[in-house]
Image (cartoon, rainbow, N blue to C red):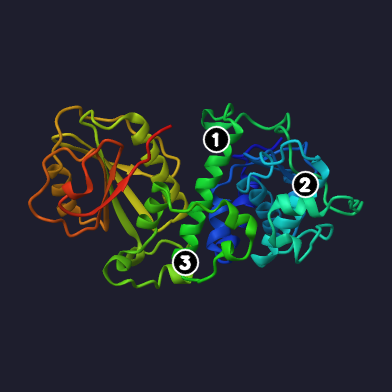
Amino acid sequence: MATPSDPAFARLLSGSRLRLRGKSAFFATLLLQADIVPSQEVALAATDGDRVFLNPQAAAQLPPALLDGLLLHEVLHAALSHVQRRGPREAKRWNRAADLIVNGMVASAGLPTLETAPRDAHLETLSVEEVYAALEGQEQSQDEEDEDLLDAPPSDAPPREGGRSGDTPARQARRWSQTLAQARAAESLSGHGSDPLGLHRELARLAPARLDWRSHLWRFLARTPTDFGGFDRRFIGRGLYLEALDDESLRALIAVDTSGSVDDQAVQALIAEVQGVLGAYPHVQAELYYADTEAYGPYPLTAGSEIPPPQGGGGTDFRPVFVRATEQEPDVIIYLTDGYGDFPELVPRSPVLWVVPPGGLEDEGFPFGEVLRLEERA
């Protein structure tokens, strides 16, 4: 049986992700953030609203473009919370309504859909609830796609990684909502000028009124060094992802205040988001420092790498980190702190983003840089 780490299965997924990179920054980001696992119990592909399940043998027989469209189809179901939003509605009609919508989105990404995939140029731009109501009394064709919205994961699915097997539907939906915000940020940075939210009411309905802190962080990191100095978009303008080139890479210094004033949850949240950016943008390279009155590090930070245990615990002095920054000249500096400490007298040459948890120093107390505030936890 194939596993997520099986080389053949991994090649299927990486090939699809690479191909989609050149088509749409928005959809590519969704696919990159999806957890796609093998399952023999699904005929081709399905989702439980959290993960996407793919039959490795059946998928391997598909033409590459059709596989890309299939994966995007399932990822969109998950991202749009189609499983969680069904409620007491009739499952088959809801599945068909959701299929109409995501098939239209797949087509707008320039990808083919299965021959049996239903399409309706008018309905596919509406919300799934509206389409469900419009389909009342209509019979589903026998040739249409099988139901792919699952109430539970297949029994042969591997355990959920990261201890999230007990996540509630609300938490799953919140996680995908954050991913959608990241995808919007990536699309705006791509320079392509197209906004999928303007084409599909389903996406517009779920769009946040404002970017949350995670999306702001993605915007800050998903740039090139020349973007900061002169808005030279030559890197992003060629697509969301490219091979990292020495003169086009972005080096980020990530500093975490370990004086005791920043809790572990804030540290984990920030580093997890930075790792997400690193996985999505190969041109970003990051090094991590812990700091109290000294700077501890650097620790190389990569997508999926283990986070080194924190060091420190004394007072707060920002100057040691900025001394390191002067020596290394990173392209950007991100500093997680409550802001209560000693600042350097000289403004650093690198752009600085202060990430501040609730209760931290007011914006005007920071002598330089941008201030990004973490939300209060419910």
Query: Does the rendering let one see residue 66?
Result: no
Query: How far apart in space, not on screen, are marks 2 and 3 (Cα)?
Result: 32 Å
Closer to the camera in the image, 361 or 306:
361
Where is 313 relative to 139, above or below?
above
Please state the horizontal and vertical placement of residue 240, each as a whole percent of the image.
Answer: 48, 63
**Element marked by disc 1:** helix
Closer to the camera in the image, 285 or 207:
207
Q: Amino acid at mark 2?
A: Asn
Contact (Cβ within 8 Å) of mark 2 with mark 1: no
Query: Does the rendering let one see residue 51?
Result: yes
Q: Amino acid at mark 3?
A: Ser
- Position of the N terminus by quadrant: top right
Farthest left residue?
345
Please tell me in which quadrant of the rendered image residue 267 appears.
top left
Please state the horizontal and vertical placement of residue 289, each as a whole percent of the image.
Answer: 25, 40
Q: Which label is found at residue 95?
A: 2
Q: Which label is found at residue 190?
A: 3
Q: Earlier along the polypeptide chain: callout 3 or callout 1?
A: 1
Which residue is identified by label 1?
A: 171
Q: Earlier along the polypeptide chain: callout 2 or callout 1?
A: 2
**Element marked by disc 2:** helix
Closer to the camera in the image, 230 or 212:
212
Q: Which residue is at a point 69% across and 62% down the rendered structure image?
A: 125
Q: Earlier along the polypeptide chain: callout 2 or callout 3?
A: 2
Q: Which residue is at a point 55% across and 62% down the rendered structure image?
A: 21
Foreground label between 3 and 1: 1
| Left or right position of 159 against 314 | right
Query: How far apart in space, not on screen, are marks 2 and 1 (Cα)?
Result: 22 Å
